[in-house]
Amino acid sequence: SDVNVQKEEVTDVRLRKGDVTNDDTYPRTLIPFKCMYADDMVQLALLGEVGEFTLTVTNQLTGEQWSVENALSLQTSTASGTYWVQIETEDGSIYYGTYVL
């Protein structure tokens, strides 16, 4: 019998640093996180030393918000919409991006 295997869809979330206006001239290596969304979870990978940080995800349509400190994953929602991802580090740096479901 045939078995249907559903491949998990992964969405990369491109992060930008909050005080930089021209993203194209800013080397990606200076962003100390890699961020992705898969299966109702926002997941981070650390690419550098950042100290403590807060990860917040907001559904831009409903305003629903999820937040966690110093964790590399955060369960959010599977509802369609645009989601704002923000990471604030202990030195006050802010990294942000969006993903769409």
Image (cartoon, rainbow, N blue to C red):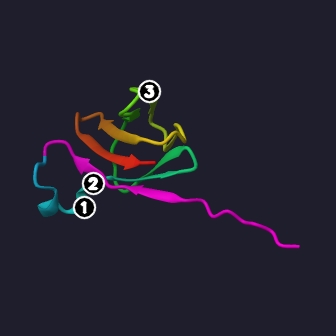
Q: Which residue is mark 2?
A: 31
Residue 33, percent across and down?
A: 36, 52
In which quadrant is the N terminus drawn?
bottom right
Q: Which residue is mark 3?
A: 64
Taking the magenta stretch, the answer to whether it contains residue 15 is yes
Say which of 44 and 92 sits in front: 44
- Describe the element under mark 2 as helix, strand or loop: loop
Task: Tell me the CA gap for discs 2 and 1.
Answer: 6 Å
Task: Tell me the CA gap for discs 1 and 3.
Answer: 29 Å
Q: Is residue 51 above or below residue 27?
A: above
- Give the residue drawn at x 56%, y 44%: 40
Say which of 22 and 29 sits in front: 22
Q: Which residue is mark 1?
A: 28
Do the CB atoms of the residues marked 2 and 3 lie less than 8 Å apart?
A: no
The amino acid beneath tag 3 is: Glu
Q: Check disc 1: other Cα within 10 Å, few if <14, some if 14-19, many if 20+.
A: some
Q: Is residue 39 above or below residue 56?
A: below
First to last magenta residue range: 1-19
* Mark before the other along the chain sequence, 1 or 3: 1
Residue 27 lies left or right of residue 47; in this view the side is: left
Q: Nearer the viewer, mark 1 or mark 3?
A: 3
Query: Residue furthest toward the right?
Result: 1
Q: Check disc 2: other Cα within 10 Å, few if <14, some if 14-19, many if 20+.
A: some
The amino acid beneath tag 1 is: Arg
Taking the magenta stretch, the answer to whether it contains residue 77 is no
Do the CB atoms of the residues marked 1 and 3 lie less than 8 Å apart?
A: no
